[in-house]
Structures are given as structure tokens and as C-alpha cells.
Amino acid sequence: MSTPPAITHPLLDRAGVRHGFFTREGGVSTGIYEGLNCGLGSSDDPDKVRQNRGRVARALGGQPDDLAGPYQIHSAVAVLAQTGWPADRPKADAVVTSTPGVICGVLTADCAPVLLADPVAGVVAATHAGWKGALGGVIQSTVDLMTAAGSDPARIVAVVGPCIAQDSYEVDEAFERRFLVEAPGSGRFFRLGAREDRRLFDLPGFVLWRLEQADVGEAAWTGHDTRADAGRFYSNRHAFLNGEPDFGRMLSAIRLG
């Protein structure tokens, strides 16, 4: 069995935690899901999805049952994991743990995955930050729960993984107005699109701003645009624009020990 490749980052390497933003490479799924589809909610063969998730867990030195991945609902809910969740996944969009061996993981396919670590306190987290969760406060909820588990936000390092970038993310004026109302100062993350009534939204930039607002000590983006590289990444928007009926999901994960 081959080990799937993953994108890592120096901030988390220096924190001494195992982590990876896994791509669509190195899996057993076929067809429109070709590769490492880890999405339990996709219409892919469930056995292939389980095999792919197992490959990710083993790549991080664990077993499939060590994986704590929530049932994602585009919310601001963060939950604490003391064990893996092989079944009965809680509805949430961020997972925090201080238990060595538990693998915190989130699924994305254009939304922003965020991996966080406080190496001094021994606390890590994985967050799914789509536009709705990022606007609604999922980053702050994650940092608050990490703090409750013993972290100091100033010690936390965070990395935003592959997600849809501004050049690929066209939205309408109503989308922009919602942000301007609910997140004053967020106008900097929009610029004119191809038409007067269209905008281009900088999701990774907005998530980094949310991390700054949460007083996270240091944060970075890996710089990968999921929609622009369909051979390497799953992308909801790419699938929609190409008339595909479904799409795979990538798993980003982190663990202590």
C-alpha cells in the first residue's frame, strides 16, 4: 500500500506535530472521484472512501479509528475529541484535541482547511472554513476551545491549506454586501470581477484575517488554488462548471505524537 503525498508547512513542522493537507493523489477511487476521495458524504463507493481515509490515518502514524472528523454543517461549532470517531460523528466544523494519537481532520473541496497547533500546551485543531463558517465565527470558536484546553492564542501557529483563491472565486454583489454588514472592514477581500455586478472574493485572505482577529500568534497560507488545478485537487466549483454530478473531498489532518 502506497503512502499518499501531502502538503506540509514549516510552521507546523517547527511545532513538532504530524500534519498533512492531503490532495487527490494516492487513492483508490475511480471515475469522477479518481484518487484519494475521503468524502463520506459523496456518492463514491463507501469501501473505497474508507480505504482512502485509512491511508491518510496511516500516513500520519495512526489507524483509521484514530480519525476524529466531524459531520460538517458549515457552522461555527468546534468540538473536543478525546478519541477517534469511527462512527456517530458530531455535527461541527472544527475539532480540537490534547490527546496524543487522536487525528483531527476536516474535509474540503474549495473551502479552506485550517490546521492549528500550540506545541507548548500540546493542543492541536483542524477547522473547515468555508465562506459561511469563516464569516460566522468558526475560527474564533476553534481558538476559544483551544484556549479552554490550555492554549495561549499567542503561541498558536495556524496554516490555511489549499482552497479556492481569489482569481477563481466569483460571487455576486449580495454576497459582498453580507460580508460588509457582518464583518466590517472585510471590503479589502473583494475586487471587481469580469462584469460590473460581479466580485472576486479572497477566501484565504479573509481566513487569515479571522486568525489575526483571534490573536493567533503566526499564520500562513500554503498558496494553492484548488479550482485552478483539478488534476491535483478536488474542487466543487470546477465540478459544477463542468457539469459533473458530484465531486471528491480532500482530508486535511493533524495529530500530536
Image (cartoon, grey):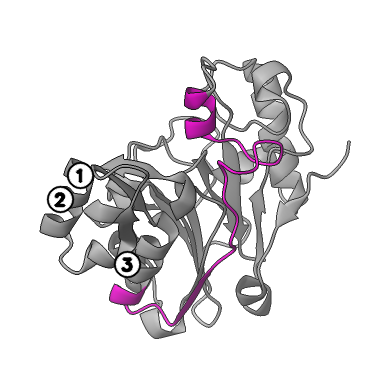
Which mark identifies residue 177? 2
| Residue 212 percent coordinates (x, y) | 35, 76
Task: From the image, tell me which residue sits under label 3.
Answer: 210
Gap between marks 2 and 3 measured at Cα:
18 Å
- In the picture, the quarter occupied by the C terminus is bottom right
> Which SS class for mark 1?
helix
Q: Amino acid at mark 3?
A: Arg
Q: Residue at x 29, y 60 (%)?
A: 141
Q: Residue at x 18, y 61 (%)?
A: 183
> What residue range appears in magenta?
212-241
Mark 2 or 3: the one toward you: 2
Task: From the image, tell me which residue sits under label 1.
Answer: 173
Q: Residue at x 79, y 38 (%)?
A: 26
Q: Which quadrant would residue 214 be assigned to in this image?
A: bottom left
Q: Crowding near pointer 3: few (<14 within 10 Å), some, many (20+)?
A: some
For the residues labelled 2 and 1, say whether their Cβ atoms are less than 8 Å apart: yes
Disc nearer the start of the sequence (3/1):
1
